[in-house]
Amino acid sequence: QVQLVESGGGLVQAGGSLRLSCEASGMIFSINVMGWHRQAPGSQRELVAAVSTDGSTEYADSVKGRFTISRDKRKNTMYLQMNTLKPEDKAVYYCASKRGPWGSYVEWGQGTQVTISS
């Protein structure tokens, strides 16, 4: 199985930056797509950004131009660089993985809290 562990969440002022990390372990070879999701209280969980093994990326409209997803293959780690943070970015951020672009995310981390102060 694949295990995912997020880190890097915390408190930051609006306009500031954070970098989230997701370390994968286990059957890492089976992962084709990794993505960051977030969920705020009273809101639906949404896909924030995703990266595939070929390097292609996608972003939610709400974070385009502010967030950057990347991965370090040697460290089996995915990152989400979050810049120009807004109060509406406050949420629990989850790392997830799946086998292909057509399927559902099947492995999930425990989440890391991002809080924005204004």
Image: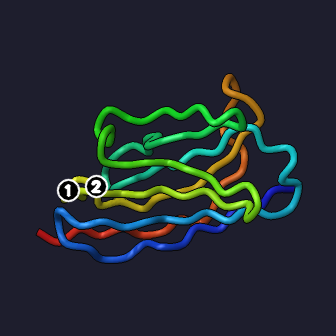
Point 23% across, 56% down: residue: 84
Name the residue nearer the viewer: 44 or 71.
71
Q: Quadrant of residue 102?
A: top right
Residue farthest along the bottom direction in this orientation: 11
Q: Position of residue 48 (x, y in %)?
A: 43, 43
Amino acid at pointer 2: Asp
Point 73% across, 65% down: residue: 75
Name the residue nearer the viewer: 106 or 84.
84
**Numbered label attached to residue 18:** none
| Mark pair 2, 1: CA separation | 5 Å
Amino acid at pointer 1: Lys
Judged left or right of residue 14, residue 111 is right
Q: Which residue is mark 1?
A: 86
Q: Which residue is mark 2?
A: 89
**Image height of 28 relative to 7, above or below:** above
**Image height of 1 relative to 102, above or below:** below
Q: Quadrant of the C terminus?
A: bottom left
> Alpha-carbon neighbours of circle 2 within 10 Å: few (<14), some, or many (≥20)?
some
Q: Position of residue 88 (x, y in %)?
A: 22, 53
Q: Secondary structure at mark 2?
A: helix
Q: Secondary structure at mark 1?
A: loop
Q: Quadrant of the N terminus?
A: bottom right
Judged left or right of residue 17, residue 55 is right
Number of residue marks: 2
Q: Are marks 2 and 1 in contact (CB under 8 Å)?
A: yes
**Image height of 42 relative to 17, above or below:** above
Q: Position of residue 53 (x, y in %)?
A: 72, 38
Point 41% across, 69% down: residue: 113
Point 32% across, 42% down: residue: 63
